[in-house]
Amino acid sequence: MKVLYAASEALPFAASGGLADVAGSLPQALKRRRVDCRVVMPLYGTIKDEFRATMKFITNIMVPVSWRRQYCGVFEAKAGGVTYYLIDNEYYFKRSTLYGHYDDGERYAFFSRAILEILPYIDFKPDIIHCNDWQTSLVPVYYTTIYGSKEGYTGIKTIATIHNIQYQGKYGKEILGDVFGLGEETTPLVEFGDCINLMKGAIECANKVTTVSNTYAGEILDPWFSHGLDPILKERSYKLSGILNGIDTKNYDPETDKDIFCNYSAKEPENKAKNKAALQEIFNLPVNENTPVIGIVSRLVSHKGFDLIKRVMWEVLETTDVQLAVLGSGDWEYESFFKELATAFPEKVGLRLGFVPDMARKIYAGSDLFLMPSKSEPCGLSQMVALRYGSIPIVRETGGLKDTITDSGDGKGNGFTFKSYDAYDMLDAIRRALAAYGDKKLWDKLVKRALKCDNSWGKSAKEYIALYESLLAE
């Protein structure tokens, strides 16, 4: 089975979010299960020279972008046993950031068209092209409308994965032909809500549509979660399924992680306490093994649940022996809130604004609890990483949080959960977690249970292979 995994970012070459983790890990897991999975992505200007030095030039071609014909260089690289094809065009991709440019629509139209145009030149005809998010949503559209009947292209299946439905690739209808190179007859495929919606086009044209957790697959049929796309998803629900993401358990391993203070494991978890003491120290908090530390590593934005935290955290700190270790950046409102907390409670709140990867790992390893009260969370990786490091998650039951964390009130769960998007429901979960922390025998069992949770890519890869096989059998 041959799969071409199309993504706008992938580790180790370029990353801005969770998609890069998935595109860097899932193909490796598929490869280990004898699926010839290769990755295609842009050759961004931000890619480090050390990676560029390992790349092999294959060829260059001209790619049509509506009436334009644009240069496309094709490079090959290897990482983690996986072959990567990197699409070069300095006009589109030699920029300081991956996204947020005025011509993103044109940039990723070029990338999507290039993915299909390079197939005759790379000696690799995929059985399936697996696309991800709006940046590659035009691949199923172009395949359906232009390439599917061409010699050398017949029989390829397409899959579109929605990592976050909030970002859909919306553009004015006036550029349908001028930028995307699509005729008026294709308007019904991509038009939605009086604009061009690239994700809608992928939902219409792809053979299968997946998203990154089973719960999220159900949630996006609801207007509250769908950002307007629920009508088309309901019409095409026969295509839709949810497969939970995993994490790279070799990368996130407390037994070997060089970025944490002291290594430990599920068999020998005692050294986790040393990580806690060191974390308290670097955040200038009193070192006290009996005071629970709640970790937060996140973008500080409302849909991550920070309006709930803002509502009740002052009360928590005033009435409870607890400490916070916070790492993140985002909206001025929430950055200011945590600054106020750190000033008002200097012995209870440690704050680092920004994102420092090694500090994130120190918080996972050193915290007792990990707070993640998201309004919506398609999959979420942080709660799985927290489990991997024995930090017990407190989460709202949404998306992948619901699929990975079960409440320990039954003595079998691996965290603490609440259902309603309500500050006082979250407060109740925090209080239950703190009460459990006070019972040392119970807590030690809970930490060991968390450390043994398996959120590796193995299970997810098997589900993707089953999906691929079912699609090819149709």
Image (tube, rainbow, N blue to C red):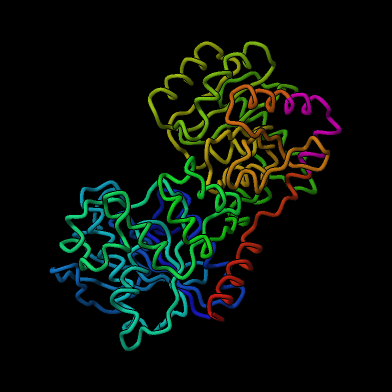
Where is residue 69? Give x, y as percent: 15, 71
Q: Which residues are magenta?
A: 432-448
Is residue 446 on the magenta stretch? yes
Residue found 70% across the figure and 54% down from its top: 454
What type of secondary structure mainly makes up the magenta span?
Answer: helix
> Image check: 372 left or right of 59?
right
Residue 65: within the magenta? no
Q: Is residue 177 left or right of residue 318?
A: left
Q: Position of residue 136 (x, y in %)?
A: 36, 62
Q: Quadrant of residue 71?
A: bottom left
- Residue 29 is situated, as x and y percent measured from the top left of the image, at 58, 67
Q: Is residue 24 visible?
A: no
Q: Nearer the viewer, residue 76 or 317?
A: 317
Establish if 250 lies above or below 363: below
The image shows residue 131 at horizontal and vertical percentages of 42, 65
- Residue 397 in view here: yes
Q: Nearer the viewer, residue 246 or 171?
A: 171
Can you say which quadrant of the picture contains the C terminus?
bottom right
Answer above or below: position of 305 versus 166. above
Q: Residue furthest left?
A: 67
Q: Residue at x 52, y 31 (%)?
A: 305
Compared with residue 275, is residue 458 higher up or lower down, i.e. above or below?
below
